[in-house]
């Protein structure tokens, strides 16, 4: 007969299989829901296996924790709008990494005597996971605050900021080395935590809003790596594997997104993108734009044969994805070819636009990534930009004084006509004004995206 511990190991193996399958299925839009359910199933099995593998000394605390978590988590899952998913993701990273760091600290104080006498590896890994955990906590909290608008999205730039940030990390690492050599010196641990917390704060404060999707992926990687390290400390195999999968997938995603922005990790973490240069801003402010009505756009679309939608955060804010789909259906009923241009960092988190459009039941084969859609734009009659600002800014290609210069963007300006739906001519989250507003082939339609698109649907039907 299989004993309880052996059963838990078998369950761990099954949970790991579900985790691997979830990553595989989440790599494609059409199987992403299956991937989400696979991950949830794997985590449920992992929790059951852990309860079987370890002796529970205080069931009341365990049950209380589950109840508190359910009371807090259920309303968040049901009520948080799609526009706030990036913020929710950032806070999940924050609390997950904080839990990892606190468990690591508790393990140290509980088993300090045994660690001090015979376990050089454990104390080394423990210091590493606590540094990663604490810096991810404050970094994710600042990312949440910037995404939520609690603090400005522009980077906090000051002379010598890189040196100050690295000095904090260096002190934390140096103190960790000291603790590894002298494991009984417990007074060092809170100091390491303090410098790690400060480093995470300074790191993300200096990063601009345009880089938040990549930063979220990087913080996800940090959280996964800290969980994997904690698995070694606790000798928990599921934590090691799950944390490694989380950390590696977050790292790969961050690399893909960095490549899509034509930038490196170092540039994103220390480049300060979003600090707008005065010379550029002054030159742009002197120009004006021409506003158009939905009826004007409908008249133009009556002669179109191909239309591309370029969604962005403005669509998410107004919850306009369903109306976009409705307009696309109306255009297709008139024989117009419709596609969707997806920029890898549009919105506030990786895959933000894919999630919103999937929610509106947009066919997967109509979604085109940037590399596929850009060559098709010059032959397109009209591109309808729905609140996508930074990722459509041609200054990224043409203006060397722009903080966005070098970042690959959707080449919407090369279409015959560009319809830009936006509340105002205000700059994007990066703080950079959009050159697209002032081009002769751009029709600016001001207003809430959902309201404008609803009026446009009516106008197109009446053509």
Image: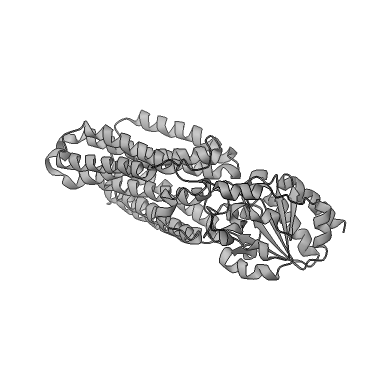
The C terminus lies in which quarter of the figure?
bottom right
Res. 19 in view = no
Q: How is the image coloured?
A: one colour
Res. 206 in view = yes
Query: 276 left or right of 332?
Result: left
The quarter of the picture where residue 187 lies is: top left
Q: What residue sits 27% from the left and 40% below the top?
A: 172
The residue nearer to you, when weighing 48 against 249, is: 249
Residue 378, above or below 392: below
The quarter of the picture where residue 56 lies is: top left
**Residue 251 x %, y %:** 40, 55
**Residue 166 x %, y %:** 32, 44
Q: What residue sits 66% from the left and 67% below the top?
A: 377
Query: 171 left or right of 18?
Result: left
Residue 267, above or below 108: below
Q: What residue sits 65% from the left and 45% below the top?
A: 426
**Residue 84 x %, y %:** 57, 42
**Residue 247 x %, y %:** 38, 52
């Amino acid at each position: 007969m299989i004993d309880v511990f052996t059963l838990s190991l078998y369950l761990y193996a099954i949970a790991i299989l579900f985790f691997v399958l979830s990553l595989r299925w989440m790599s494609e839009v059409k199987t992403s829901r299956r991937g989400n359910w696979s991950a949830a199933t794997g985590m449920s099995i992992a929790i059951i296996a852990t309860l079987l593998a370890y002796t529970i000394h205080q069931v009341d605390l365990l049950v209380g924790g589950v109840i508190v978590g359910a009371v807090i988590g259920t309303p968040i899952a049901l009520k948080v709008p799609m526009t706030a998913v990036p913020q929710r993701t950032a806070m999940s990273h924050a609390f997950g990494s904080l839990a990892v760091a606190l468990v690591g600290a508790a393990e140290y104080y509980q088993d300090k005597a045994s660690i001090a006498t015979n376990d050089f590896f454990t104390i080394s890994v423990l210091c590493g996971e606590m540094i990663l955990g604490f810096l991810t906590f404050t970094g994710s909290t600042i990312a949440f605050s910037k995404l939520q608008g609690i603090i400005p999205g522009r980077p906090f730039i000051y002379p010598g900021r890189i040196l100050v940030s690295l000095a904090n990390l260096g002190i934390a690492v140096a103190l960790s080395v000291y603790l590894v050599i002298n494991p009984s010196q417990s007074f060092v641990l809170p100091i390491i935590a303090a410098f790690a917390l400060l480093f995470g704060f300074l790191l993300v404060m200096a990063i601009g809003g345009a880089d938040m999707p990549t930063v979220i992926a990087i913080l996800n990687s940090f959280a996964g790596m800290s969980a994997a390290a904690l698995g070694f400390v606790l000798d928990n195999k599921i934590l090691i594997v799950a944390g490694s999968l989380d950390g590696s997938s977050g790292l790969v995603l961050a690399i893909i997104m960095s490549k899509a922005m034509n930038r490196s990790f170092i540039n994103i973490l220390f480049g300060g993108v979003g600090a707008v240069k005065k010379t550029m801003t002054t030159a742009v402010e002197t120009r004006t734009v021409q506003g158009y009505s939905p009826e004007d756009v409908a008249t133009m679309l009556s002669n179109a044969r191909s239309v591309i939608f370029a969604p962005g955060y403005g669509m998410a804010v107004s919850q306009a994805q369903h109306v976009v789909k409705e307009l696309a259906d109306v255009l297709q009923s008139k024989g117009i070819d419709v596609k969707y241009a997806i920029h890898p960092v549009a919105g506030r988190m990786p895959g933000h636009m894919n999630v919103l459009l999937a929610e509106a039941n947009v066919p997967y084969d109509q979604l085109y990534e940037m590399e596929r859609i850009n060559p098709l734009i010059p032959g397109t009659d009209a591109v309808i930009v729905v609140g996508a600002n930074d990722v459509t800014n041609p200054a990224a290609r043409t203006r060397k004084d722009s903080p966005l210069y070098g970042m690959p963007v959707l080449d919407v300006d090369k279409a015959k006509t560009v319809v830009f739906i936006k509340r105002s001519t205000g700059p994007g989250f990066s703080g950079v004004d959009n050159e697209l507003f002032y081009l002769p082939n751009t029709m600016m339609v001001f207003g809430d995206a959902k309201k404008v698109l609803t009026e446009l649907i009516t106008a197109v039907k009446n053509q």
